[in-house]
C-alpha cells in the first residue's frame, strides 16, 4: 500500500482521554502527523448503552476517515474499543488499533494477586474484560469499579480548573473497600482519561499502589502497523476535531497545544 507521508494517524475518543494514548505515540514517532477527534456531542461514553455506541462509533469514524484520509485509526477509548471495535473494523478500510485494559501486564507484575480495574461503568461490565481476566489473571482476584466522576475530573484538569481531591479518593475507595481490596497492589487504568489524573490518584491512595495503562504498548503497535510507510521529514502541527464546539472547547486549547494539536476544527 502506498501512503503519502502526510497521511495522518487518526486518534479517536469521546473527549480528551485519548491524549494519554497520543503522548507516548508522539514520543515514539515524533514526525507522525495527527488528527485527534473528540466526540463532544456524544460525551460521555461510559454511561451510554452498548447499542448506542455500536451504532454511533463506526458511523462517526467512517465520516472522520472520509474527511481526513488517515493511514490508520486508533480508538483511544477503552469503552468504545471493548464495545464497538469489531464494528469499526468491519466499517473502515484502514487498519484500526483498539485500546484494551492492561490486565495482562498487571497480572504479570502483581505480587498479592489482587488487581483492581478502574474504568467507566460501561467498560468494567463488558464480557471482553471477563475474557482478559480469565486468560491472563485466572489466579488473581479482579476487582472492578466504574467512575464517571473521574472522567469529568480529567476533562476539568485539562481545562485548567481547580480539582476536588475527593473525586480521586472516592474512585479508589470503590476498589479498596471491596472484599480483598486491602490486598490490592495493582490498579489497571481502564479508561484513557484516567492516566491524565494519575497524580491525583496517587495522592488519594492511602498506601502505595502501582497504576498501569496501555499507552506505550499501543504506541509500539502503531509503529509496527506503520511498518516502512514514510513519515514527514519534520514534525507537523496536529489538528483537534470536535463533533461539537461547546463553551468548554476553547479552554482546552492550551492543553491541546501541549500535545502538539494547534488547530481546532468542527466535524
Image (cartoon, grey):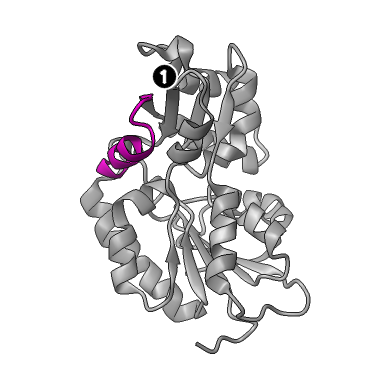
Q: Position of residue 61 (x, y in %)?
A: 39, 68
Q: Position of residue 141 (x, y in %)?
A: 36, 22
Q: Residue at position x 35%, y 11% from top?
A: 179
Camera-nearest residue between 262 and 29: 29
Residue 136 falls inside the magenta stretch: yes
Q: Residue at position x 36%, y 74% from top?
A: 92
Q: Which residues are magenta?
A: 126-141
Query: Is residue 248 visible to us here?
Result: no
Residue assigned mark 1: 174
Q: Position of residue 155 (x, y in %)?
A: 56, 41
Q: Residue furthest bottom?
A: 2
Quarter holding residue 236: bottom right
**Label 1 residue SS:** helix
Q: Is residue 204 left or right of residue 42?
A: right
Quarter holding residue 240: bottom right
Q: Residue furthest right?
A: 234
Q: Is residue 177 left or right of residue 27?
A: left
Amino acid at each position: 500500500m502506498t501512503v503519502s507521508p502526510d497521511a495522518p494517524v487518526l486518534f479517536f475518543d469521546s473527549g480528551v482521554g485519548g491524549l494519554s494514548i497520543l503522548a507516548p505515540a508522539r514520543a515514539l514517532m515524533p514526525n507522525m502527523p495527527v488528527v485527534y477527534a473528540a466526540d463532544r456531542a456524544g460525551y460521555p461514553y461510559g454511561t451510554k448503552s452498548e447499542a448506542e455506541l455500536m451504532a454511533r462509533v463506526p458511523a462517526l469514524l467512517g465520516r472522520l476517515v472520509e474527511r481526513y484520509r488517515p493511514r490508520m485509526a486508533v480508538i483511544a477509548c477503552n469503552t468504545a474499543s471493548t464495545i464497538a471495535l469489531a464494528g469499526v473494523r468491519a466499517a473502515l478500510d484502514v487498519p484500526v488499533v483498539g485500546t484494551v485494559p492492561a490486565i495482562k501486564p498487571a497480572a504479570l507484575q502483581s505480587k498479592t494477586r489482587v488487581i483492581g480495574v478502574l474504568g467507566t461503568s460501561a467498560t468494567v461490565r463488558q464480557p471482553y474484560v471477563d475474557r482478559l481476566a480469565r486468560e491472563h489473571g485466572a489466579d488473581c482476584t479482579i476487582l472492578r469499579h466504574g467512575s464517571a466522576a473521574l472522567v469529568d475530573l480529567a476533562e476539568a484538569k485539562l481545562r485548567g480548573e481547580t480539582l476536588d481531591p475527593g473525586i480521586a479518593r472516592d474512585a479508589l475507595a470503590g476498589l479498596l473497600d471491596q472484599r480483598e481490596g486491602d490486598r490490592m497492589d495493582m490498579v489497571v487504568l481502564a479508561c484513557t482519561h484516567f492516566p491524565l489524573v494519575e497524580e491525583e490518584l496517587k495522592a488519594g491512595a492511602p498506601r502505595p499502589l502501582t497504576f498501569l495503562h496501555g499507552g506505550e504498548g499501543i504506541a509500539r503497535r502503531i509503529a509496527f502497523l506503520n511498518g516502512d510507510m514514510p513519515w514527514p521529514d519534520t514534525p507537523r502541527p496536529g489538528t483537534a476535531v470536535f463533533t461539537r464546539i461547546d463553551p468548554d472547547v476553547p479552554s482546552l486549547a492550551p492543553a491541546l497545544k501541549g500535545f502538539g494539536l494547534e488547530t481546532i476544527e468542527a466535524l
